[in-house]
Amino acid sequence: MHWWFPGNASSVGGQVDSLFYVILYVTGAVFVLVEAALLIFVVKYRRREGRRATYVEGSTKAEIIWTAIPAVILVSLALFSQPLWSKIKNSDTYPKNADRLAVEAKQFEWHVTYPGPDGKLGTDDDFTKKDELHLVVNHDYVIELTSRDVVHNFFIPAFRIKQDAVPGMHILVWVRPTVAGTYELACAELCGLGHYRMRALVVVQSAAEFAAWLQSQGVAVTGTTDTSATAGKGAP
Amino acid sequence: MTAHAPAVGHDAPPQGGVGVYTQKVGMWVFLVSEVMFFTALIGSYIILRWGTGAPWPEPRTVLAIPITALNTFILICSSVSMVKAYAAATKDDQAGLKKWLLLTVLGGATFVSVQAYEYHHLIEKGFLPSSGLFGSAFYTMTGFHGFHVTCGVISMIWVTIRAFRGKYAGGNYRGVETIGLYWHFVDLVWIILFTIVYLI
Amino acid sequence: MTAHAGAVAHAAHDDRPFIRKYVFSTDHKVIGIQFLFLSLFFLLVGGLLAMGIRWQLGFPGQPMPLGGWLPSSVAPGGVVAPKTYNSLVTMHGTFMIFFAVMPLLVGVFANYLIPLKIGAPDMAFPRLNMWSFWLMIPSGGLMLASLLVLGGSSAAGWTVYAPLSAMPDYSGVHLGQQLWCVSIVIFGLSSLLGSVNYITTVVNLRAPGMTWFRLPLSVWALFITAVLAILAVPILAGAVIMLLFDQTIGTHFFAPDAGGQPLMWQHLFWFFGHPEVYILILPAMGIASDIIANGARKPIFGYHSMVYAMIGIAFLGFIVWGHHMFQSGMNPTLASSFMVSTIVIAVPSAIKVFNWLGTLWRGSIHFTTPMLNALAFVSMFIIGGLSGIFMASTPVDMYIHGTYFIVAHIHYVLFGGSLFAVFAGIYFWYPKMFGRQMSERWGKVHFVLTFVFYNLTFFPMHILGVGGEMRRIYDPTVYDFLRPLQPINVFITVNAFLLGLSQLVFAVNFIGSLFKGEKAERNPWHDTGLEWTAPSPPPHGNFPETPTVYHGPYEFSVPGMAEDFVPVNTPPAAGGAGAAGAAGGRHG
């Protein structure tokens, strides 16, 4: 009965969760205090015989206090959020030696292009796999996210990352998985009638397991590719 | 007791407020919404042309600048005749009012006709709304402007008919002022459009 | 002299034919009531569409009750098809936002209340007002028709993101999306005509003594809302026209292959879309303020702050739109600036909540049906507002964007907020509109049922969101990580049906009271507003002669006065504790 965050499996997930909890505690406290005040007032100041309401127009002091305190809390939350946002989304901060992958979203599949033995994307030994994203644990990856048709969204709940894939744009997404396992990639932007089934597997594995998987795909060290494994590469 | 005839509709005297009569307030508010509408179109044009790096032909290689410049001049003249019409109405010069209103209608109708001719010419040349981003933006922006001018011409004809029936005699010139505001607005939008779409 | 006599005759004697009086009427009250019937109908349509959504989410792949009646292209074997589901979510949002909540808050209350509350006989432009209502008929008709055409209705979400919405090849929807666009443009025109009227009327037609800072907060809210509409709705019109052209005449505004910009759609839409949500909440806030002051028998605490807070919300509402696009691929630094403005806009909303609490403090609270609904508005708006703070934080938004956490937020502010305020307003002004009272007992039953089932339906959606359940998903069980959440979906679905059924109590009360309700007196709620000085219902022309206003809008429980309320047009007692005269002076 798992009704909360999926287990965290990326380097930033813990920080995202922490920020969520900070906001939860702050808003939770405010919620309790304000709703309690509402309830107390509603009970305490209900109409009673012989008691009239007190004619009060306002209080400048109260206005200042309840403007300043929320403002300070809220601005602090914003300041607190900014560094993490920059770290996740600002491509200037991404590790320079990250491995590159290309993910192309299309109705209704994810095409993942791996660089192949030469380690470079955009060369002849790249191979593309449909709906399977294999990553080595504790490695940095920068994914070049594109879309062939409409706006999709690249959402890996276990990594806490989400990024729209926009046709005509190349968007960089940094991920660093930290826990081996099999997770799911979902499309989180309505993209047509197959949107609900635009699912892919995200397999985080050790370097050895990854190499074994590459071999099973017919990708040899010498760079020859078994064409039967290159599902989905090129035009449909 | 300050009671007097309850104010109903556009002929009401100002009641406090901003000291501007109701019809005029209404027209100004409407024009603000029109500004926002054209801002959406013009803003999109600016982004598509200068914000994206997409290929874009030089407008003068596609559009007929000389005749459109003349058309712009005609529209500006119709604004001048509108100013004259309003001045005549304030002075209760009914003959002048009728003359200048007719000239305004003529100017507006000419503008729309020349634009229709321009469209015809462009379509024959093969420049269509589907002709790239420039085609998309050109026809949408000038088309909606032309639609607004057409509505203005129709309203102006109606106002002219009312003028001929003496409805603006004796200092009742508010209807003339109100349509005038709309007319000048439509002219101003054209000047901006002409500059951004045709000239730059 | 003649004018005066004409004014008296104007209010007392009305010999217009039936069709001018009740059908093609220029009377703002009739128009307001026409909007009421129209929008309640569309509330029903939107609600039924929601039932379809909830059925599929609760019981994916199961035949829907009465589903066999639907054509097999829509629901083969009574089971909702995936494309139908996408249409359901799209049209539920579309009907609810444009045809239910906006007309309920603005079309009904702005039209009905503004002239009455400011002491005017009607709107500034009564014929334009009539057009504003009647344009809703082709608009609504086209939108309903779009449900029936080949290819189905728009299925790209109420936000109709391009290029999905622009290209039938991607969405499978042809005519349906075009009808959506045309309908929305006509709707926009209706909204604009209404707004021109509301603004001009409030600016120019206030009765003597009704200064700006004596306006009730409902009028302030509706005025500010009209300004928002004037500025934002034309942007939507422009965007939708560009979308329509992309679909029909081959333009390329949003088509990337020709250089078009999908993100430009989002910027244009949300530049409208964010002020739009303030259009959906400000009138609710204004109505709630009037009713809370009345129910607590106390002036609104901090009246001036309340006005400035609404102005602040409206102004800031124009610079936060990017928070709907944090994950869109926009420049992250630009996104951060939107985070700041979004965080800041929470402040004036908080100010309003505290002022409502201040109004209740040391009040004498009467638990009438309108008051209960207004209190529910405040308590639910608090939740909706607080949940918004999670989304304002860009890293957290990264996870919850596009999930049910957002859906929960939307429904807490739009249903918990706007709709409870609508109910409050209907229960409150029904006697004035129809000359009859709704049943207080059944009103309270409706309130309790709605409040309970509403919270049981929508609160669990926050949990779905934290679990990662995406929006607009036909079948969540496709995903392993979502399958454990499915019992929550079932729970929500059951409560949603019960919530829907509970509205029958309202419907029966509303319709039944039109014929059998107790006749209403002039001022059943002992309220201070000018509308309560007129008969229930007021005649054409509203007041026999223009009233003069001497007091602020919330003179309740004034010390030294025998009655616990002072209508705004009560002349000051000679040497008594009255307010300043007509021409000057203001309270607070």
Image: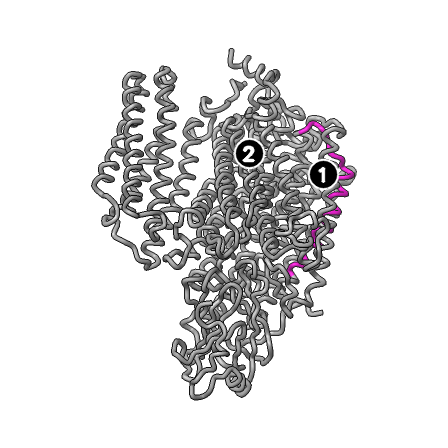
**SS of the residue at dot 2?**
helix
Q: What is the magenta range?
A: C434-462
Height in image: C579 above or below C220? above
Q: Which residue is mark 2?
A: C214
Return the mark for residue C507.
1
Residue B153, picture quadrant: top left
Q: Indicate whether residue B136 is drawn in magenta.
A: no
Amino acid type at circle 2 is Arg
Label 2: chain?
C
Q: How is the image coloured?
A: one colour
Camera-nearest residue between B119 and C499:
B119
Q: Is residue B19 visible?
A: yes
Q: Is residue C281 visible?
A: no
**Which residue is drawn at the image coordinates 52% and 57% (left, top)?**
C343
Q: Quadrant of the N terminus of chain B?
A: top right
**Which residue is drawn at the image coordinates 68% and 33% (left, top)?**
C430
